[in-house]
C-alpha cells in the first residue's frame, strides 16, 4: 500500500512534467529567440525626460563595490531629475535577482540598471520586463545579449593591459626585468590581458623592459604571497611586478612592504583603493589602476535615461551624452565602454572609498 | 485539535490582513493578476517541497537535504543535457535520482536508527557536493524555449503559473494521502507515539522510508521546475532553500515534534510567507528588514501553539 502510493505520486509527477512533447535533445533544440530587436530608431535630439523611474539592481546589497556604483547612479539620478531606486538581494545566488526584476516590472518602472549574477538565469525575467516596456541596461556583468538593451563594459582588454604596461614602465624608469603575477593559468580575462601586455612590450618604447616570468597565484592570498617571494628569489635583477588581479596585487604589496625589496622592486596592478591604500602611503606601490565603479553606475543610469527618453535604442553607432562623463557611442552587440581605467596614486587615493 | 484549528484560522486571518493592507498600500497592484503570477512563481518550489516535508515532519522526522537534492537534480539535468540526452529521458531519470537520494536518507534513518536531523545535515552537504562534482561551477543554459517558457508565461487565459498547477495537483494527492487514507493515519500515529504505532501493527520503518523517498522525488521535481524557470542548470541552485521550506511548514502549524499539523495549514503558511515577502519587496522594504520579519514570524509560529496550549491548560486547571 505504502509503496504503491509512493509510486503513484511519483509517476503522476513524471507524467505531469513529461506531457509536453517528445524527443527534445541539445541537438534537436532550435536556438532560442535571438538578437535584441531595435526596430524603432533613436532620436538623438530628444530631450532627457524628467521624473524617470529607474531601478538600480546590483549583484547583492551591502557589497562595497556596488555601494560605490550605487552612489554614482544616484548622482546621475539627481543630475537628470530621475528617481533612482536601489534594491537587491542580500545573497549573490544565480536566481535571487529575479524577484526584484519582476517587482520592477510590476512597479512599472521606466528602466532597470542591473549587474547580472548569472547571465542566463536573469534572462527570462529581463525579457519579460522588456516586453512590459522597461529599458534594461546591464553594467559590470552582462546578461544574455538578447535580454538587455545596452551593456556598459567597464574597460576593454586593450585599455586595461596597455595601461598596466605603461604604469610599470613609468615606475621602473623604462628599463629592467619585469614579471607578471596572474590569477589562475586558465582565467580568461587574465590570459587575454597577458597576451595584450606581450604585444605592448614588443613595441619600441618598451624595448628596455624584459618579461622574465609569468607566475600564477591562483587568486589565493597565501599562494600569491609565496609566488611573489619565489619571483624575487628566482630573479635577483627583477625591477617590477604587474599583478592584474585584486588578490594578487594586495598579496604582493604585503610581501614587498615588509621585505628588503621595498622601494627597490616596483609593483602595479589592478586593485581597489581600500586594499592598497596603506601600501601606496608607505611608498611600496607608486600607482595601480581599476575602473571607478561610481562612474560605471553613473554611465549606466545616464544610458538607461537616454533609452527611456528615446534618444537611443541600443543600436550600434548611436551617440549620446552622459553628463559630466561626456559623449559615448554604442558599439557592436549593444556595448558601451566606460573608458580607460582610473589610475590611483598617493595624490588621489583618498578620494576613493571602495 | 481545537488549538490547531485556531492556528489555521489565525493564518487565514493573517492572509486576509496581508492581502487587504497590500491591496490598499500598493494602490491595487498587490492583488493584480501580474503580481499574483510573480508571487506564484516565487513560491512554486517551496510549495512543492513543503508537501512531502509536511508528512515527514508529522511523522516526527526532518529532511534538511531537500534543497541539496534540488541542486543535485539541477546539476544532473545540465550534465545529461550536455551529454546529448533528450529532456523526456532526463526528467524521469532525475526524479528517480531524487528518489534514490531520499531512499539513502530513509535507509540511514530507519535501518541504522540514526536521528534524521544528523543524517540529513550530512546529506545536505553530501548532495550539494555531488552536484558540484557533476557540474562544477559552470551553468548550462541552452534549454529549448518550449520548456523554459513555462517559467515566464502563465497558463493561457489565466494568471496562473504552471509550477502552481503542478503544486496544486500534488497538493490534492498529498492531501488525500495524509488526511483521507489509512497511510495518513499511520503517519500521524508514528509522529504522536512511535512505540504505540509499532505495537498497533503499523510498519513504522516502511512508512518512514517511503516518506523520505517521496521527499527526495518531489525535491527533484522542484529542481526540474527551478532549472527551467531560470533556464539555468547550476549546482548551487536553491542554496539555503531548505530553511524557507521548513519555516513555511512550521508556520503552517505543523509541530516539529511530530503528530500534529495539516496540509491546509502548510499551504497557508507558504502563501503567507511568500505573500509577505512579495509585498515588502513591492514596497521597497530593505533586505535586512525582510529577513528580520521572516525570522520574527517564524518565532511567533513556534511560540503561538505552545502559548495557546498553556493558556488552555491553565483555564482547565482553574475551577
Image: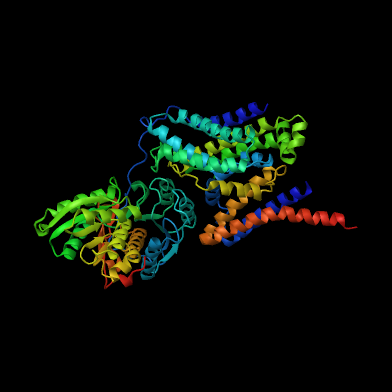
Picture coordinates of residue A145, whole percent (x, y): 33, 47
* Residue under the point 72% across and 44% down: B260
Q: Quadrant of residue A259?
A: bottom left
* Residue under the point 32% across and 60% down: A250
Q: Is residue B234 above or below residue A160?
A: above
Q: Quadrant of residue A175?
A: bottom left
Picture coordinates of residue A335, whole percent (x, y): 28, 53
Q: Is residue A103 above or below residue B55?
A: below
Q: Could you tell whether A285 is left or right of B9 in the image? A: left
Q: How many marks?
A: 0
In this picture the colour scheme is rainbow
Closest to the observer, B285 or B291: B291
Examine the rendering and report whether any part of residue A127 can be seen: yes
Q: Is residue A5 above or below residue A234?
A: above
Picture coordinates of residue A209, whole percent (x, y): 13, 57
Closest to the observer, B1 or B264: B1
Closest to the observer, B117 or A158: B117
Examine the rendering and report whether any part of residue B270 can be seen: no
Q: Quadrant of residue B116?
A: top right
Q: Is residue B202 above or below residue B46?
A: above
Split into 4 quadrants, where in the image is the C terminus of chain B?
bottom right
Picture coordinates of residue B39, whole percent (x, y): 55, 49
Q: Could you tell whether B76 is left or right of A223 in the image? A: right
* Residue under the point 64% across and 46% down: B249
Amino acid at each position: 500500500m505504502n509503496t504503491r502510493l509512493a509510486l503513484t505520486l511519483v509517476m503522476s509527477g513524471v507524467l505531469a512534467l513529461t506531457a509536453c512533447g517528445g524527443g527534445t535533445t541539445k541537438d534537436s533544440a532550435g536556438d532560442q529567440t535571438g538578437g535584441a530587436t531595435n526596430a524603432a530608431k533613436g532620436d538623438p535630439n530628444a530631450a532627457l525626460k524628467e521624473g524617470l523611474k529607474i531601478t538600480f539592481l546590483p549583484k547583492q546589497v551591502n557589497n562595497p563595490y556596488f555601494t560605490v556604483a550605487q552612489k554614482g547612479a544616484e548622482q546621475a539620478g539627481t543630475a537628470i531629475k530621475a528617481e533612482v531606486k536601489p534594491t537587491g538581494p542580500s545573497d549573490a545566488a544565480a536566481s535571487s535577482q529575479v524577484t526584484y526584476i519582476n517587482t520592477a516590472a510590476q512597479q512599472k518602472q521606466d528602466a532597470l540598471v542591473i549587474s547580472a549574477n548569472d547571465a542566463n538565469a536573469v534572462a527570462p525575467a529581463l525579457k519579460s520586463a522588456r516586453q512590459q516596456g522597461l529599458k534594461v541596461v546591464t553594467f559590470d556583468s552582462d546578461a544574455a545579449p538578447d535580454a538587455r538593451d545596452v551593456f556598459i563594459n567597464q574597460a576593454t582588454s586593450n585599455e586595461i593591459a596597455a595601461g598596466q604596461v605603461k604604469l610599470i614602465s613609468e615606475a621602473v624608469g623604462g628599463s629592467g626585468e619585469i614579471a607578471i603575477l596572474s590569477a589562475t593559468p586558465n582565467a580568461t580575462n587574465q590570459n587575454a590581458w597577458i597576451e595584450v601586455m606581450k604585444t605592448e612590450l614588443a613595441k619600441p618604447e618598451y624595448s628596455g623592459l624584459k618579461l622574465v616570468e609569468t607566475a600564477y597565484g591562483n587568486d589565493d592570498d597565501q599562494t600569491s604571497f609565496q609566488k611573489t617571494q619565489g619571483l624575487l628569489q628566482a630573479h635577483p635583477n627583477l625591477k617590477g611586478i604587474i599583478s592584474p588581479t585584486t588578490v594578487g596585487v594586495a598579496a604582493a604589496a604585503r610581501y614587498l612592504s615588509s621585505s628588503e625589496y621595498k622601494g627597490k622592486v616596483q609593483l602595479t596592478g589592478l586593485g581597489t583603493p581600500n586594499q592598497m591604500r596603506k601600501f601606496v602611503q608607505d611608498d611600496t606601490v607608486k600607482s595601480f589602476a581599476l575602473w571607478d565603479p561610481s562612474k560605471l553606475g553613473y554611465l549606466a543610469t545616464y544610458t538607461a535615461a537616454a533609452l527611456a527618453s528615446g534618444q537611443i535604442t541600443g543600436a550600434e553607432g548611436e551617440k549620446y551624452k552622459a553628463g559630466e562623463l561626456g559623449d559615448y557611442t554604442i558599439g557592436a552587440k549593444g556595448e558601451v565602454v566606460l573608458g580607460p581605467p582610473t589610475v590611483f596614486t598617493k595624490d588621489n587615493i583618498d578620494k576613493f572609498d571602495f | 485539535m481545537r488549538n490547531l484549528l485556531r492556528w489555521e484560522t489565525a493564518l487565514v486571518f493573517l492572509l486576509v490582513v496581508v492581502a487587504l493592507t497590500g491591496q490598499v498600500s500598493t494602490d491595487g497592484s498587490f492583488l493584480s493578476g501580474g503580481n499574483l503570477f510573480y508571487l506564484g512563481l516565487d513560491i512554486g518550489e517551496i510549495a512543492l517541497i513543503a508537501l512531502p516535508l509536511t508528512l515527514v515532519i508529522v511523522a516526527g522526522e526532518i529532511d534538511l537535504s531537500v534543497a541539496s537534492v534540488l541542486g543535485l537534480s539541477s546539476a544532473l539535468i545540465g550534465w545529461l543535457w550536455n551529454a546529448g540526452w533528450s529532456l523526456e529521458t532526463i526528467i524521469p531519470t532525475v526524479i528517480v535520482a531524487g528518489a534514490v537520494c531520499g531512499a539513502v536518507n530513509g535507509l540511514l534513518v530507519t535501518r541504522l536508527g540514526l536521528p534524521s536531523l544528523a543524517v540529513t545535515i550530512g546529506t545536505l552537504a553530501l548532495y550539494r557536493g555531488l552536484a558540484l562534482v557533476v557540474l562544477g561551477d559552470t551553468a548550462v543554459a541552452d534549454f529549448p524555449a518550449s520548456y523554459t517558457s513555462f517559467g515566464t508565461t502563465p497558463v493561457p487565459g489565466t494568471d496562473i503559473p504552471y509550477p502552481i498547477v503542478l503544486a496544486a495537483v500534488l497538493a490534492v494527492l498529498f492531501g488525500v494521502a495524509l488526511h483521507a487514507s489509512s497511510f495518513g493515519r499511520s503517519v500521524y500515529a508514528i509522529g504522536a507515539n512511535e512505540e504505540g504505532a509499532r505495537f498497533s501493527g503499523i510498519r513504522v520503518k516502511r512508512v518512514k522510508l517511503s516518506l523520505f523517498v517521496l521527499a527526495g522525488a518531489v525535491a527533484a521535481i522542484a529542481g526540474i521546475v527551478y532549472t527551467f524557470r531560470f533556464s539555468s542548470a547550476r549546482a548551487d541552485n536553491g542554496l539555503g532553500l531548505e530553511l524557507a521550506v521548513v519555516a513555511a511548514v512550521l508556520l503552517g502549524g505543523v509541530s516539529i515534534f511530530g503528530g500534529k499539523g495539516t496540509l491546509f495549514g502548510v499551504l497557508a503558511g507558504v502563501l503567507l510567507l511568500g505573500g509577505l515577502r512579495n509585498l515588502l519587496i513591492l514596497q521597497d522594504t530593505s533586505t535586512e528588514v525582510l529577513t528580520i520579519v521572516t525570522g520574527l514570524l517564524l518565532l511567533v509560529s513556534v511560540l503561538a501553539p505552545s502559548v495557546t496550549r498553556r493558556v488552555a491548560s491553565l483555564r482547565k486547571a482553574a475551577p
